[in-house]
Every structure is written in structure tokens, then in C-alpha cells.
Image (cartoon, rainbow, N blue to C red):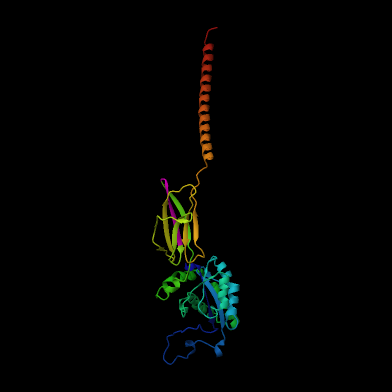
Amino acid sequence: MWKRVLWSDETKIKPFGNNAKRYVWRKGNTAHHPEHTIPTVKHGGGSIMVWACFSSAGTRKMVKTDGKMDGAKYGTILEENLLESAKDLRLGRRFVFQQDNAPKHKAKSTMEWFTNKRIQVLEWLSQSPDINPIENLWKELKTAVHKPSPSNLTELELFAKEEWARISVSPCTKLIETNPKRLVITAKVRHILFSLSVRPQVKVSGQEKGDAMKLHCQVYGFHPRPVDVKWMIGNDEVHSYETTNVLPNPDGTYQIRVSAEVTPKDGDSFSCYVDHSSLEEPLLIKWESPRPFPPAVVIGAVVSIILIFTFTIAGVIIYKKKKNYSAAGTSDTSSDSDKPA
């Protein structure tokens, strides 16, 4: 389920230092020695603000923003990068986008854009930036960016984009695989899990049982848990059926199977009805019974087999008669030649 989420965030990167505390072993009264300090410049030396996104399939394009980020600039970033990133990462049309609750993210124009593009946004808890797995990548990025010691903001931007693109798929996948474990640490955070809606997949099949037919409707890969599944005959519900409990899958989604034993008659139409919160309208998956061969085809096949068998027997009989006649003729000729002149 989490593999379908596209995670995003913005972060500020400075030319010097990595915005984190660093500790060293030192002797007393040596706190200000050069080897124990991080070089800075007056007024902080400036900084850059970048936006980026990633999924379990890797990182995508990083975008630098000029000036203060507002709703309009954020909307431009989404318009130019979001759908392209989802496509490059092969997340499918029904991917889920994650963003925090910053005002620019929740602006009316931004939310209308999501609605018009039919993009599902993951509901996010307020004051919860540390549970976004992208934070781990930001930390690695800033450490890597400062190793070559960029001398200006242009170099800083270049190094940041190069290092972001260099992050391999493996750490991204690992972060997403361990993300549910972090999210379920507290009951409050579990709320996030239930804000993600995943469409169910449906598979119908039938199994003959004498004159009856056992129909199975397998519904799987959906979230949240509540779901309504039943068999229908025409527009009426099949009242006698058996169902399993809704069972969890390893990826956080659920599955259920509903079966019904029926005796199909001419004109009967059976369908599996599935209703779930992720669906705009219920699904109705029709069961197609195995089509028997038409009577004309069956009769034709039987006649063909009989004819082939008849001709084969006739051929064998004729062959044997010819063989016996030939043998008799040879015997008579031999007898005549043995008579004295």
C-alpha cells in the first residue's frame, strides 16, 4: 500500500554546516580551536530552499524555489513536476500524494488543483514532520552536499541536485518498508493509516458440484477494512452464501472471499457486488458460465468420428481381401507350373 505513496517536502540548505549539532572529543579550554568549530560567514551566508519527492522506487526531480514559497509558487511546482514524477516512478494513475499541513499546501487553489487532477492526498497529522520518511533523506543529502564545500549558492544548488539524483533505490525502498512500523508507534499516528483509501481488486470463478455450481468472489487489496460483498442473481441478492472474515494482508490492505452455491437455469445472470469507500460507485462483476459447444457442433463432431471409424474399418477389410486374393492367385500359378508337359 505504501509503495503507491509519493512523499514530498521542502527543506532549507545552507552553504556551511548541516543545520545539526555535532559533537567532538576535546581538551578543556579548546572549544574555539579551528579543528573544533564549523566555519560560517556573516548573516549565515544565505541558503537555498528546495522541493523534492520520492517513493519506494527512488527519488525524482529536485526544484529550487526563488524567494519565499507561497501557494502560487507551490502550485507551479506541482503543475510542472508532480504528475511527471509519478509517471517516472511508475506509481500508476491512482497514486497517493503526501504533503504536510503548511498553509501553502492547504491553500484553496492547491486543493482545487488536486481535485481537478483527481489526485488523492494523504491526510496528515498536524505537527508531525518527523514521521515523514523524506526527513531521513534530507539528513543524508545535507551531509553529502557539504563534503565538497560549496563556495556559493550556485554550487550549493548544483551539488544538492547531483546528490539527490545519486541516492539509490535501495535506501528509498527500505524507508518505505519500515515506515508502517514507525507510524504505528502511537495510537494517534495510526490515524494516518486509515486515511489512505485503496480500491479493491475482484476476481470471480466457478466450480461445478454435480448439477450445482459453487461461485467464488475474491476481493483483495483494499483499504480501509469495511467492505460490502454479496452475490446477485439479476437484480436480487442471493440469500444463501458463505463468507470468510475480512483478513489483513502483509502490506496493510485486506481481503475477503464470498461464495454461493447455485443451480443455474437458462437466462440466469450471476454477479458479484462490491461496495467500498474508495469506489465512486459499487462494482458489479459478472460471472460468465463456461459456454458449452452448440448442439450442431457436437452432432457434427460425432458424425465425423463415426465416418472416420467406418472408413477405417472398410479400408482394413478391403486391404485384407486384396491380400488374400493375391496370395490365392500366386498359389494357383505355382501349382500349374508343377504339372508335367
- Residue at 51% in and 20% down: 324
Q: Residue furthest top?
A: 341
Query: Is residue 43 visible in the rendered structure shown here?
Result: yes
Q: Position of residue 151 (x, y in %)?
A: 58, 83
With 255 as the anchor, is 89 left or right in this view? Answer: right
Q: Quadrant of the C terminus?
A: top right
315 over 47 or under it: above or below: above
Q: State whether residue 61 appears in this view.
A: no
Relative to 310, is 87 above or below? below
Residue 162 versus residue 271: which sits nearer the camera? 271
Q: Residue at x 53, y 24 (%)?
A: 318
Q: Residue furthest bottom?
A: 29
Image coords of residue 11 (percent x, y): 53, 80
Q: Can you tell which quarter of the image residue 87 is in?
A: bottom right
Q: Nearer the viewer, residue 57 or 3?
A: 3
The magenta stretch is 210-220
Where residue 194 appears, as percent x and y from the top left, is: 44, 71
Magenta stretch encompasses residue 76: no
Residue 175 horizontal/vertical position (percent): 46, 71
Q: In terms of image quadrants, where is residue 216?
A: bottom left
Q: Going by the picture, which residue comes out furthest to the front?
A: 236
| 298 vs 186: above or below | above
- In this view, the residue in front, 38 or 66, is 66
Q: Main secondary structure of the magenta part?
A: strand
